[in-house]
Amino acid sequence: MLRANPKRKQKTGGGGNFAIVASRYNARYVDAMLRAAQAELKRAGATVKVVRVPGAFEIPAVAAKLAQPSAIHHPLSAIICLGVIFQGQTSHAQHISWGVTHALAQIQVQHKLPVIHGVFVFEKQEHAEVRCLGRKHNRGTEAARTALAMARVMVDI
């Protein structure tokens, strides 16, 4: 049986200390995911810092900076990254999404900190509406739940 490692416990309220990096681009969808994620974390008693960036491609730079240990803030339990990219007629969306995915994975492994990937590529607005604006399948809620679960895992190992 695994026991909690007291050295890794966060020094915040019972819910942990989280950061959300959210794109301003495609704000209608990202803002809805952000509100849902914040609400879920608040229900868990977490502390949340939100940082807005211009677009999805800028998310990893801020996530990397937030992942660095700092004497001025408590260690983070996890970072949630939120963005929406629409597939156009060129391969630009794939290049952006691949770059973001690769960078977030590197940050997560390098800093041993959960980085929740909530940057989505959609072909149609209808798909984004269901997954970002609705309550039943809101990806912001799902990202927050994943962050909370991973924060617990990281404390327990």
Image (cartoon, helix red, strand yellow):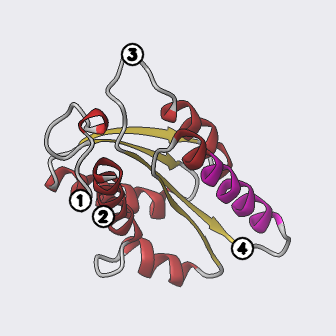
Q: Is residue 96 magenta?
A: yes
State which region is magenta: 92-106
Quick one: label 3 or label 2, which is nearer the N terminus? 3
Quick one: label 3, few (<14), some, or many (20+) residues within 10 Å? few
* Dot 2: element: helix
Quick one: label 1 or label 3, which is nearer the N terminus? 1
Q: Residue under label 1, please give it.
A: 40
Q: Residue under label 2, please give it.
A: 145
- Amino acid type of disc 3? Ala
Quick one: label 4 or label 1, which is nearer the N terminus? 1
Name the quarter where the N terminus is drawn: bottom left
Quick one: label 1, few (<14), some, or many (20+) residues within 10 Å? some
Label 4 to label 1: alpha-carbon separation: 29 Å
Check residue 87 in the rendering and tell me which mark sits there, or answer none: 4
Label 3 to label 2: alpha-carbon separation: 27 Å
- Amino acid type of disc 1? Glu
Quick one: label 4 or label 3, which is nearer the N terminus? 3
Quarter of the image for residue 152 reads bottom left
- Amino acid type of disc 4? Gln
In this rendering, position of residue 34 left or right of residue 97: left
Quick one: label 4, few (<14), some, or many (20+) residues within 10 Å? some
The image shows residue 147 at horizontal and vertical percentages of 36, 56
At 32% across and 51% down in the image, what residue appears?
151
The image shows residue 102 at horizontal and vertical percentages of 70, 56
